Image (cartoon, rainbow, N blue to C red):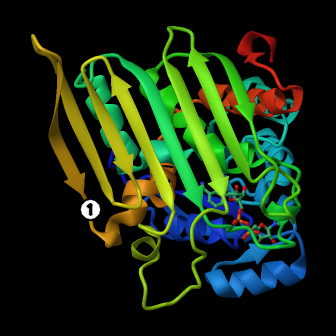
Amino acid sequence: MITSNKTIAAAVLGINGMGATHVQAAKDSPWINRVMGYEPTSELASKYSIDRDIPATHHINKILNDPQIKLVYIAAPNEFHCDLAIQAINAGKAVLCEKPMGTTLNEATRLLQAKQNKDSFLQIGLELRYSKLYMQAKEWIDQGLIGTPVNTHCDYYCSEGHARGSWRSESETSLIAEKLCHYLDLPRWWIGDEVKNVYSVSAPNVVSYFNHPDNHQITYRFKDGAVSTLAFFMHTAESFDGDPLQDIIEKQVDDGHRLTYLIYGTAGAIETDVFRRRIRRWEFKDAPAKLESKLVDKITYPSKEDSLWMHNTHGQNIEVSRLVAHGLPPFTEASDSFQSMKLVFAAERSELEGQVVEMSEV
Ligand SMILES: NC(=O)c1ccc[n+]([C@@H]2O[C@H](COP(=O)([O-])OP(=O)(O)OC[C@H]3O[C@@H](n4cnc5c(N)ncnc54)[C@H](O)[C@@H]3O)[C@@H](O)[C@H]2O)c1
């Protein structure tokens, strides 16, 4: 790893919610010497400037025209990602844009083209690739410890987390784009192959005020034959009432919440489990009488390391600042993230059309 003391200035567009995490990572980064925030109105800029303890503006040009600001993090609501990222790229900035890469295939395509036209740094915030649970799975797969991965299954069940009237509930952007893009991206990364086709269905909603489905069952096949499935419901499980004395994961572990992957290979299997804070690995042996399976690895982690293991946005952002300060390319190319977004939009289309969608036709 390069450890020179080269530093740059950075900006965060949208400094509430996830933007607060981006600001904190920028403050913590040894590669960033100054952070500026942006909010769309002077009231919001003033309010969040105080909350985040950084200067903030509602004049985007103050950021775009500042030659010392080399890196822009985008944490605005999804509908603004494409235009903000293109503006920043055209102003010569490196960009880390939160997922999704756009709310439509057209937006994601426009953003990729803008990046390619300028040959600029663009990384999409699919930060599970920086999270230890999923990196460990990748490491075991790359070491050949489960043979060839042929089947992955993700179960993601949670209580309703998007309040009535919030931009997420009101948005027509599906939860496949907003949330599940992370969980469609990982199998592509692990299996290292492109998707051939996808079929997705959703049942009638339980959450009546969502402007989009609250559940999805997505099945997709890779070109070399591997198959992945994802089952998602946002209403199962007991709602968390925010008891400050209770650890949220401890509360949720056995009341219906689930976020697991099972990854089956020809020689073993891996299970990641967020709510049990563990990753396990089995080895398969073709014994004379039958296939024998043995649990050979189990790693657990303490609650204080939750973010590091399951959602490492902080680590992703610090690493991106290192790459940009040293003129290095992204860890994940935008063209790779674009393939995950194509899968997202193909799954949405499959639900609308009620049929299998071939990726070659998207
Ligand atoms: N990677 C992850 O796991 C993860 C987790 C949470 C959120 N996110 C992403 O972060 C983004 C923000 O989500 P959030 O939960 O922080 O939302 P939020 O509503 O809490 O915060 C969004 C902020 O953006 C500001 N904003 C609104 N319009 C803007 C504009 N045109 N330009 C700049 N800023 C604008 C809002 O005033 C607000 O401060 C979303 O794209 C979301 O998908 C990613």
In the displayed structure, 318 sits above or below 242; it is: above
Residue 294 appears in view: yes
Q: Determine the secondary structure under disc 1.
A: loop
Of 288 and 58, nearer the camera is 288
What's the residue at 51%, 54% (across, down)? Answer: 317
Q: Position of residue 312 (x, y in %)?
A: 46, 56
Horizontal placement of 101 versus 330: left or right? right
Of 284 and 86, nearer the camera is 284
Q: Position of residue 174 (x, y in %)?
A: 79, 47
What's the residue at 68%, 22% (across, down)? Answer: 198
In the displayed structure, 145 sits above or below 286; it is: below
Where is mark 1, residue-wise?
301
Q: Which quadrant holds the C terminus? A: top right
Residue lying at the far front of the rendered structure = 289
Q: Which quadrant holds the N terminus? A: top left
What's the residue at 88%, 62% (across, down)? Answer: 170
Q: Position of residue 287 (x, y in %)?
A: 11, 15
Report the image quarter containing ligand 1: bottom right
Q: Position of residue 108 (x, y in %)?
A: 79, 34
**What count of labels does the image hold?**
1
Binning the other alpha carbons within 10 Å of mark 1 as few (below 14), some (14 to 19) or many (20 upward) gives some
Residue 115 appears in view: no
Of 23 and 292, nearer the camera is 292
In the displayed structure, 202 sits above or below 56; it is: above
In the displayed structure, 331 sits above or below 79; it is: above
Disc 1 marks which amino acid?
Tyr
Horizontal placement of 69 versus 185: left or right? right
